[in-house]
Image (spheres, rainbow, N blue to C red):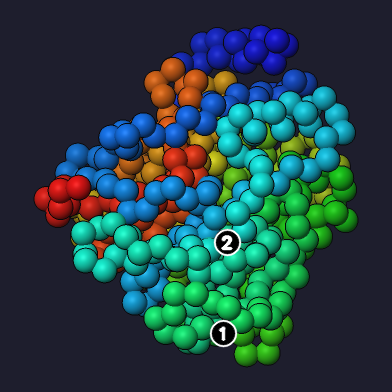
Amino acid sequence: MIGAGAILMRRWGKDTELPALGSTPDIPQAKAQGIPTLKMPTAKGWEPGHKPTAAPGLEVNAFATDLIHPRWIYVLPNNDVLVAEALQQAGPVKTAFDYAIFATMKRAAAIGVSANRISLFRDTDGDGVGEIQQTFLENQNQPFGMALVEDTFYVGNTDGIVAFDYEAGATKITGEGRKLVDFEAGGHWTRSLLVSPDETKIYAGVGSLSNIADHGMQKEEGRAAIHELNLADGSSRIFASGLRNPVGVAWEPNTGELWTVVNERDGLGDEVPPDYLTSVKDGGFYGWPYCYWGQTVDDRVPQNPEMVAKAIDPDYALGGHTASLGLCWMPVGTLPGFDTDGMVIGQHGSWNRSNLSGYKVVFVPFENGAPAGKPRDILSGFLAPDEKVSYGRPVGVTIGPGGCLLVADDVGNAIWRVTGAANVKPD
């Protein structure tokens, strides 16, 4: 009841508040919340015949259904589609706020027993539906990121990167994996993977344990960072740090720069600070936990002026608490009506904002290696208009067979396929 009252007060006058977007966002003044906002729609899923709303000129169909919390997608060279099915697992409940978060996440189907598997889908007749389904790899530890380099398949489990022998065209991996890198589990548990263009390195996003280093910086060692694994000698290092929760990672092919989407901290207001899309510099520090959007100090955190002075401004704000997770590069001409190169972003949606944000798949146009223009919707309709229920929540995004866009939906338990409307065959 207290939380509901706090949300009502915070919503007062907010219907017209503009989101913090773009390269030079207007970020409101921070207001630390004694009672953090907890507002999550109940997970409902999709009724028969109901699906996300595609932008004009586009069509969407279900490529795969009846999964168990699908989070990330990877397409093999033979166009087989791999889907990582995993779920946040409940931690210890020590306080009333811990219980409130647990109850909120459970209602949203965001916490529970993890399937811990990777499934394979094959579309043999070219109708845009993966009619062959096979368990590709099982008994993993919250698998997320996937990558293939020659005859080795890599999995980003929450506790590290594991390598498996792979044969071209195989529909199942049965051999034992080899642990290459250890990560600390818990907290922000996803571990995205991205192979370098020359296939000599793998980059992995590792999120923080807590919101603002609540248990001390020692507990955050090696976290809130993007790691680089050298495949030749097995060595690893932190490539960039101060990134609270860097999930999706992608290459901008014209400049060769690494980009990521980052989920920023909670408890400072609906638009403070915004989640963001940014290029990632080797050795760069991006502020967390000491400051945000460059050098705006977070007074809740014991400060380190030297680190604040080093903090790099992100490139592009995506609005407060959109939970931007998925990221992929989409070349011009991939989808009709999208006449520039750019990044596609899967926005999982907020759970800590008085007016909900995200719950859509958006496109950010690029020019000369940088964002240039406002985000455009590709898919929407995942959230009911009254914000009480969610039909789905988009996560991973990738370019699929034939130049379609594939989207993982972990509440709808589906993989959606987006194409030009004229290219879609009848169901």
Whichever of callouts 1 and 2 sits on the residue coming sooner in the sequence is 2
From the viewer's side, name the closer residue of 60 and 257.
60
Residue depicted at 50% across the width and 87% down the height: 151
Amino acid tagged 1? Asp
Tell me residue 159's x, y (percent): 73, 64
Quadrant for the N terminus, please. Answer: top right
Q: Which mark is residue 165?
A: 1
Crowding around mark 1 (Cα neighbors within 10 Å: few <14, some 14 to 19, many 20+) is some
Tell me residue 79's x, y (percent): 33, 71
Q: Which mark is residue 225?
A: none
Q: Is residue 83 visible?
A: yes
Residue furthest out toward the left: 422
Residue 284 lies left or right of residue 151; in this view the side is: right
Crowding around mark 2 (Cα neighbors within 10 Å: few <14, some 14 to 19, many 20+) is many
Tell me residue 401's x, y (percent): 29, 66
Amino acid tagged 2? Arg
Q: Which residue is mark 2?
A: 117
Question: Above or below — where is 346 with respect to 76?
Answer: above
